Image (spheres, helix red, strand yellow):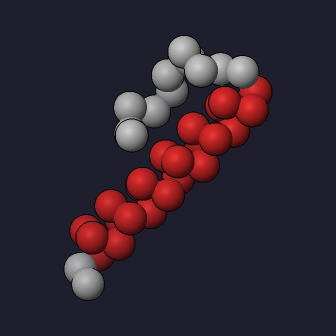
Amino acid sequence: MSSEEKFDILKKSIGSKVKELRKKAGYKSYEVFAWD
């Protein structure tokens, strides 16, 4: 696994965590990160 692949996985997991927290906080339309 290259470091680029690791970074991509990290990005995705951070993105989904942020999304989860945003939903809990009620910021559904508030886009900080563009990651899906």
Q: Taking 1 as reference, is 24 left or right?
A: right
Q: Position of residue 18 (x, y in %)?
A: 59, 42
The residue at the far bottom in this view is 1
Tell me what residue is drawn at x 44 percent, y 63 percent: 10
Q: Taking 13 as reference, is 25 left or right?
A: right
Q: Quadrant of residue 9?
A: bottom left
Q: Quadrant of residue 22?
A: top right
Q: Taking 23 as reference, is 13 left or right?
A: left
Q: Is residue 8 above or below residue 2?
A: above
Tell me what residue is drawn at x 25 percent, y 68 percent: 4
Q: Is residue 2 above or below residue 14?
A: below
Position of the C terminus, as image quadrant, is top left
Tell me what residue is drawn at x 74 percent, y 32 percent: 24
Tell me what residue is drawn at x 57 percent, y 38 percent: 19
Number of on-image labels: 0
Position of the N terminus, as image quadrant, is bottom left
Q: Position of residue 32 (x, y in %)?
A: 51, 27
Q: Position of residue 7 (x, y in %)?
A: 36, 65
The residue at the far right in this view is 25
Q: Position of residue 20 (x, y in %)?
A: 64, 41
Q: Is residue 2 above or below residue 34?
A: below
